[in-house]
Structure formats: C-alpha cells, structure tokens
Image (spheres, rainbow, N blue to C red):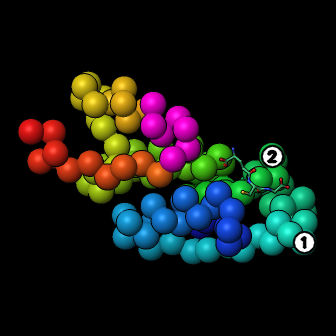
Amino acid sequence: MKLYYWPKTRAFRALWMLEEIGVPYELARVNIRAGEQTLSDFRGVNPMTKLPALDDDGVRVAESGAVLLYLAGKYPQAQFGAPIGDPLRGLWRSKSANSRLLAKRRTESRR
Ligand SMILES: N[C@@H](CCC(=O)N[C@@H](CS)C(=O)NCC(=O)O)C(=O)O
C-alpha cells in the first residue's frame, strides 16, 4: 500500500487513517510546492494531479474522501465504516461525503 503524500495537505487525512488502522504502508512524497504532481510519473497514478492518491497493489484511488471510504471498506475490523444495512450508514456517508476523517465507531456506542 503506497500513499502519495506531502505534509500539510489533504493527504494527511489518509495518513492519519492508515496510522489509526495500523496497517503497513509506504509513503511516496510528491512535493506539490515544487510541482512534482504534474510530472508524468505521478500523472500515471492520478491524472487529476492532486494529493492524496493511494496505490493498493495496482488499485489506484484518488480524492481524500474516496481514499478514506476505500480504507474503511477494506479494513472493516477497524470499525471506521458502517456496513450495508446498518441504520447508521446514512449518517456515516453524510459525514464521509464531506471528506472529514471518519469518526471511529465502536459497537458499544450504538447501545
Ligand atoms: N477534493 C480533493 C482536493 C485535492 C487537493 O486539492 N489536493 C491539493 C493538496 S491539499 C493538491 O494536490 N494540490 C496540488 C495542485 O493543486 O496542483 C481531495 O479532497 O482530495
């Protein structure tokens, strides 16, 4: 799992979530202050030339909200998402559509 990242950007959202989930990942630094997001290497990852972008073994995801949703779906044991059919799913999607860091939800909090 490789996160394309630069400090003080929206890529921090994805970095934070990867840390919370606790899975191994690699950081690929893309200096957007120096214009590296426009180089062809990175254009191949995200043609929109924006951070963050994630490459998960060839699955490429861009847009911070999409990256968070992807990670929540891939690691359900981390409880960052709400499964299909869960009444809390609407609230969860409303928040995540705004690209906020998904609030960690514990089963106990629903009781
Ligand atoms: N809606 C996008 C916004 C992405 C975005 O604007 N990222 C900035 C860094 S915070 C970027 O890569 N800027 C480089 C550029 O505009 O050339 C998201 O949430 O991922």
Q: Which residue is mark 2?
A: 48
Q: Can the viewer see residue 57 in this picture?
A: no
**The C terminus lies in which quarter of the figure?**
top left
* Circle 2 crowding by C-alpha within 10 Å: few under 14, some 14–19, many from 20: some
Q: Quadrant of residue 32?
A: bottom right
Q: Which residue is mark 1?
A: 34
* Residue 31 pos. (x, y %): 81, 72
Residue 96 in the magenta stretch? The answer is yes
Q: Residue at x 77, y 53 (%)?
A: 50
- Magenta stretch bounds: 94-100
- What's under tag 1, amino acid-wise? Ala
* Circle 1 crowding by C-alpha within 10 Å: few under 14, some 14–19, many from 20: few
Query: Is residue 76 found left or right of 29 in the rendered image?
Result: left
Q: Residue at x 53, y 35 (%)?
A: 97
Q: Kindly tell me whether mark 2's CB lies below 8 Å from ligand 1.
A: yes
Tell me if label 2 and label 1 are in contact, CB under 8 Å.
no
Query: Is residue 73 found left or right of 49 in the rendered image?
Result: left
